[in-house]
Image (cartoon, helix red, strand yellow):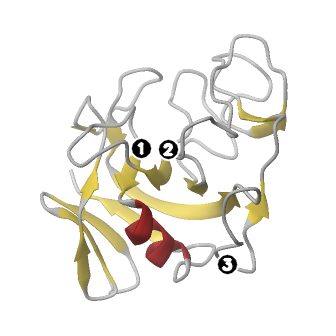
Amino acid sequence: MTADDLVLTPRGVRFMGRHVPATHGRGGIAADKREGDGATPVGSHQIVMMLYRPDRIARPAPWARPIGPRDVWCDVDGHPDYNHLVRGPVEGTDERLMRADPLYDIILATDWNWPEAVPGGGSAIFLHQWRRPGYPTAGCIAFRRDHLRWIAERVRPGTRVVVPG
């Protein structure tokens, strides 16, 4: 591991010499991640995409892609677009990226079960804003808004997110 890796620890995430408070999945940390289990998967995952709400925030990095009202992350097990960013609507999905709340104003998407998604293997392991301190996610890693912005300004495609088992 290097200082450029985001490493999940019991206290949060270690990145670039800092410790940043974070929350993870309500299902804990799991070596056998499955769709809907609420777990954060063990492993070394690369950041493959940065998405942001251009109507709410300035572009956090030059490679960040704006999201719009039809953008969804397909979490429908067995769908041809499972675990991919697509233009909606997609029947059966509830992972709309342009949310009323600020959770997805910045999204760092990882390569968990992507790009060749195994059905049932779990989808959408993001780094995003938390609801409040200590509140678990559905499997993602979440941060305070200003900390997420700080991270987003420093990561690049391929930055590793390390979740020890």
- The residue furthest left is 10
Mark 3 sits on what residue? Answer: 61
Label 3, secondary structure: give it. Answer: loop
The crowd level at tag 3 (other Cα within 10 Å; few <14, some 14-19, many 20+) is: some
**Distance in Å between CA atoms under marks 2 and 3:** 20 Å
The crowd level at tag 1 (other Cα within 10 Å; few <14, some 14-19, many 20+) is: many
Nearer the camera: disc 2 or disc 3 = 3
Please state the horizontal and vertical placement of residue 155, each as a whole percent of the image. Answer: 53, 78
Q: Are marks 2 and 1 in contact (CB under 8 Å)?
A: yes
- Residue 57 to residue 134: above or below: below
User: Of marks 2 and 1, which one's residue comes earlier in the chain?
Assistant: 2
Mark 2 sits on what residue? Answer: 125
Residue at 31% x, 48% y is: 42
Kindly identify the amino acid type of the residue bearing the numbered disc 2.
Ile
Residue at 66% x, 35% y is: 83
Mark 1 sits on what residue? Answer: 140
Residue 40 or residue 67, whichever sits in front: 67
Label 2, secondary structure: give it. Answer: loop
The crowd level at tag 2 (other Cα within 10 Å; few <14, some 14-19, many 20+) is: many
**Distance in Å between CA atoms under marks 1 and 3:** 21 Å
* Rendered image: mark on residue 73: none
In the rendered view, does 56 fall on the left or right side of 16? Answer: right
Label 1, secondary structure: give it. Answer: loop
Residue 113 or residue 11, whichever sits in front: 11
